[in-house]
Amino acid sequence: MDDQAPRLAMVAGETSGDLLAGLLLSGLKQRWPALVSHGIGGPKMAAQGFDAWWPHHKLAVRGYVEVLRHYREIVGIREQLTQRLLADPPSVFIGVDAPDFNLALEARLKASGIKTVHFVSPSIWAWRGKRIHKIHESVDHMLCLFPFEPELYERVGIAATYVGHPLADAFPMEPPRAASRAVLGLGERETVVAVLPGSRRSEIQYIAPVFLQTVALLARQRPELRFVLPVVPGLRSLVEPMVAQYCPDAPLTLLDGRSHEVLAACDVTLIASGTATLEAALFKCPMVIAYRMNGLSWQLMKRMRYQPWVGLPNILARDFVVPERLQGEAHPRQLASDVLAWLDQPARAEAARQRFVELHHLLRRDTARCASDAIAQVLQAR
């Protein structure tokens, strides 16, 4: 099968999924240069020749209440995509994260005989563990980012492969701090705080105000601090009025994207829980993780948690390496105190960086090769 270029259908539902899928496609194209891929994706996938029938941001909604507001459109997209794939079956379907969208789609495709691969295991080890039964109906092969995940699937008869995390391959073990600061126009001796309030519109609405109030408080307490906020493309018009409202006089720079350069350059980051926290850890960046969402969504999610941690660095370390402030605990005074604690305790910050180095080694597995090997086996089994 290696000498035949497969035709892949893929769905990645948000910025982090687009990043992961783009890295995966890059590796798959090394194995199959004539690879054809299409479905739902973003600019990172498009750069690898992916044909996006719908843009990935259509699915970038988090939280039960928020999803309900967009339910009709999302279901309509899924039905149209399903019918298109059933009418012209791909060699294999690869769902990248977005489990609420992808698992239902995968179940219908698998029932019709189309092989399905899911890349990025849903966090069944953290919450909603019963979802594994739905995964069994939907997925032929699970590609796992974390080493403890395959055993969970093999117990119930789901083929699974630990492929490591593609970001661990893509990011250097030693962050390019000086080069990133030079590119961003930041002085080598400046103390820089990165502010990352999320990549979804709903996250910005709930999290950015408290982050920007924290920036205003920190700027008053430590006037020498510099703040940098990388804005996800398309959301600047949402962020700029908030900056004007909450911290108009703070030394805050807005950038279009460039979050990786910002994380490499900064001394500490105030960051929304999600994939970006793992990126920060791979850049060896001390962080304060925070999250806010619709109150009803929070109550529902809180009841289904299995672990005391929500941030990926803490989950992987099985320890509170970095502070987590969720919902009511995420208020400006607390967040400002947490940020300053990292800056005022260099030994603690260095210990966290060493934990992140260990994490980086754990996750570095040449993900593209491992994943393409697993996908090749699925194709051969057709």
Image (cartoon, rainbow, N blue to C red):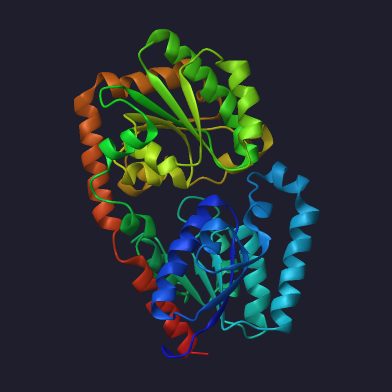
Q: Camera-side residue: 89 or 295?
A: 89
The residue depicted at 75 percent of the width and 62 percent of the height is 77
Where in the figure is residue 226, as x and y percent of width and height? 39, 21
Q: Camera-side residue: 182 or 16?
A: 182
The residue depicted at 56 percent of the width and 46 percent of the height is 304
The residue depicted at 39 percent of the width and 31 percent of the height is 269
Where in the figure is residue 261, as x and y percent of width and height? 38, 41
The residue depicted at 54 percent of the width and 18 percent of the height is 213
The N terminus, quarter of image: bottom left
Q: Quadrant of residue 49?
A: bottom right
- The number of discs equals 0
- In the rendered view, would you say 131 is above or below 6? above
Residue 205 visible here: no
- Would residue 28 appear left or right of 54 to someone viewing this image? left
Q: Quadrant of residue 92?
A: bottom right
Q: Camera-side residue: 302 or 101?
A: 101
Where in the figure is residue 327, as x and y percent of width and height? 55, 29
Q: Quadrant of residue 258?
A: top left
Residue 3 visible here: yes
Outermost residue on the left side: it is 347
Where in the figure is residue 215, as x and y percent of width and height? 48, 19
